[in-house]
Amino acid sequence: MILGLVILGAALVVLVATHGTGGAMGLNSDQIAGLASLAAILLLVATGLRRRFGESVGANLRALLIWGLLGLAAVAAYAYRDRAQEVGASLMGALRPGTAVLGPGGEVTITRRSNGAFSVLAEVNGRDELRFTFDTGASTVVLTAESAAALGIRPEEGEFTARVSTANGTTLAAPVRLDAITVGPITERRVEAMVSRPGALSSNLLGQSFLDRLPSYEVRGDRLVLRSR
């Protein structure tokens, strides 16, 4: 405390002595006053810390160590945020395969399943969530007869007139139009689709009538990345 007063007093003496001369040691009056005030404040803070540590050195060292580690963790999390996001996406995909994880720039990431396929959970017509197999070989979105029935879509026998190409070959299907398909934040409306004959397919297919509407999509290692408009 006394040293702080001495510093302020010395600064006052210098200011009085140099009044009208423009300052001293290359510093003007305002700079001298600012430096003196800063030095006094730093000295007071250092004195307080010394007294505090003198009372309980061990506890205060532990507190400083904890705060230091928290600070390092925050810096590391920011520096490696992209990698952390990838790890989070992989964890989410492992816990619930097909879940769309929103990434930077509006990207939607889906993690590959253990069987090597990409399973995509999508909301259809704004209500029911169905599981689709990502299939670039399918010319259109294809619903199994069971999934279509769950949506209230039941084509008559005579409506199964269209041939649909899939990765597993071709099948007869009935053309339909879905109000909307939503994957994460991506929603495409009035999507052309097909309903397969009962028993013809074991899973729904997310084909080109949906994928072609996206600006782009790609398979990046074990992740499927869909990009929205």
Image (tube, rainbow, N blue to C red):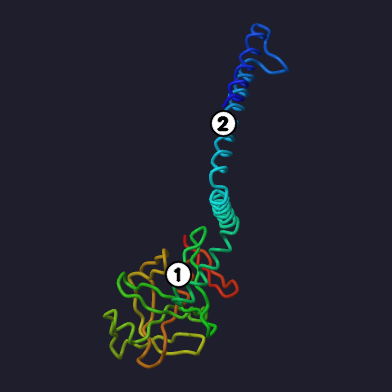
Closer to the N terminus: mark 2 or mark 1?
Answer: 2
Image coordinates for residue 94, horizontal then vertical, percent: 49, 76
Residue that label 1 marks: 100
Q: Residue at x 53, y 66 (%)?
A: 216
Q: Position of residue 160 (x, y in %)?
A: 35, 88
Q: In the picture provided, is 3 more to the left or to the right than 134?
A: right
Instruction: Identify the element where label 2 is drawn.
Output: helix
How dense is the environment of label 1, judged by Cα within 10 Å: few (below 14), some, or many (20 and up)?
many
Quadrant assignment for the N terminus: top right
Q: Amino acid at mark 2?
A: Leu
According to the picture, the residue beneath numbered tag 2 turns out to be: 44
Q: Residue at x 32, y 70 (%)?
A: 179
Is 198 left, or right, of 113 in this rendering? left
Drawn side of residue 50 relative to residue 150, left or right:
right
Residue 99: percent from left, percent from top: 44, 72
At label 1, the amino acid type is: Ala
